[in-house]
Image (cartoon, rainbow, N blue to C red):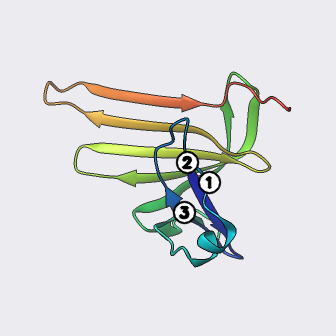
Amino acid sequence: MNIYKIGDDKIEIIYKEPVDHDATFPGLEEIKSMQPIETYFAMPIQVGTTFGNWKIVDTGISIETPYKTFEDVIVIEENGDNYVNRKYFAEGFGEIKSEYIMNTDQGEKYIVTSTLESITMD
């Protein structure tokens, strides 16, 4: 379960915990007193903007997902010693795709991808 705080120029994660069936959602007063854990996304939306370990590396691209093809997608990236994390954002939808790419000791790439497949309304 993630809880986000949306500001004028950034989105911050203020709560991040695994969820089980008996989890209780924090109360409003508790949420108001929470301090940011990390910045999830920040302005300005332009190539080169950095926040935390993340950097906007591309804007205005097209990404095909099982749900639909998105235009004007923003890509952020985090680089480590032997890995790259990428997140893809579309206006009105938020994060539509994420990739974790790790270089293994055997010289191969280990890739984990999460992509928006559908949206349901209850």
Residue 66 x, y percent position in the rendering = 69, 21
Position of 42 relative to 24 (above/below): below
**Disc 2: which residue:** 1
CB-based contact (under 8 Å), mark 1 and mark 2 = yes
Q: In what quadrant of the picture does the C terminus appear?
A: top right
- Residue 13: give its label: 3
Mark 3 lies on a secondary structure that is: strand
Residue 43 visible in image: no
Residue 32 x, y percent position in the rendering = 63, 75
Front in this rendered view, residue 15 or 72: 15
Q: Earlier in the sequence, mark 3 or mark 2?
A: 2
CB-based contact (under 8 Å), mark 3 and mark 1 = no
Front in this rendered view, residue 121 or 20: 20
**Disc 1: which residue:** 25
Q: Amino acid at mark 2?
A: Met
Mark 2 lies on a secondary structure that is: loop
Relative to residue 116, is residue 57 drawn left or right? Answer: left
- Residue 59: give its label: none
Numbered disc in front, either 1 or 2: 1
Q: Earlier in the sequence, mark 3 or mark 1?
A: 3
Residue lying at the far top in this picture: please name it: 66
Name the residue at 75% across, 45% down: 93
> Badge 2 local density, few (<14 within 10 Å), some, or many (20+)?
few
